[in-house]
């Protein structure tokens, strides 16, 4: 049975892995993010329709690196690394 300390540690590890996953997504999608940012610059409500294509590209790119499958793979790698120590 897991103790409260184990659960807190697990939560911290998962948060760190999610943060790492998001950082990688931002690095990998920098090019696409820049396109959306440039399109959105100086706009308010019109960004919704004016930058629709860039927004979709940005979301599609980010989803490649931030989905459940990627997260599960990161958790598997973490477990393998920690068990190897």
Image: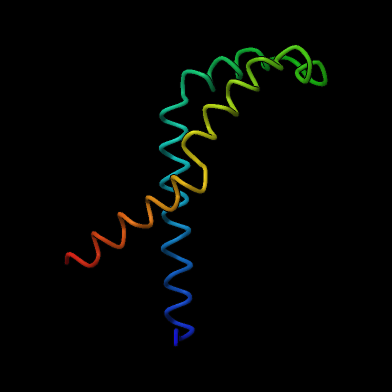
Residue 66 placed where, x, y %? Answer: 50, 41
Rendered position, 83 above or below 29: below
| Image-quadrant location for residue 80 | bottom left
Q: The N terminus appears in which quarter of the rendering?
A: bottom left
Question: Looking at the image, which is closer to me, 32 or 68?
Answer: 68
Who's the residue at 42% across and 79% down the image? 6
Q: Which residue shows up at 67% across the image and 15% down it?
A: 53
Q: Is residue 31 left or right of residue 52?
A: left
Percent of width and height locating residue 21:
43, 44
**Image spot of residue 34 (x, y percent):** 53, 18
Task: Please tell me which residue lies in front, 70 or 50.
Answer: 70
- Residue drawn at x 81%, y 15% is 46
Using residue 77 as the reference point, say whether residue 53 is left or right of it. Answer: right
Give the farthest residue toward the left.
Answer: 85
Vertical comparison of 62 with 31: above or below: below
**Number of disc labels:** 0
The residue at the point 54 percent across, 22 percent down is: 33
Q: Position of residue 39 (x, y in %)?
A: 65, 12
Q: Quadrant of residue 51?
A: top right
Tell me the colour scheme of the image.
rainbow
Q: Is residue 1 above or below residue 35?
A: below
| Quadrant containing the C terminus in the rendered view | bottom left
Q: Extreme right residue here? A: 45
């Amino acid at each position: 049975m897991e103790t409260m300390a184990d659960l807190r540690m697990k939560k911290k590890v998962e948060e760190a892995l999610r943060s790492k996953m998001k950082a990688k997504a931002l690095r990998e999608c920098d090019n696409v993010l820049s396109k959306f940012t440039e399109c959105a610059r100086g706009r308010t409500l019109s960004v919704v329709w004016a930058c629709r294509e860039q927004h979709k590209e940005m979301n599609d790119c980010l989803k490649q690196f931030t989905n459940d499958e990627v997260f599960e793979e990161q958790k598997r790698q973490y477990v393998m690394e920690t068990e190897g120590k």
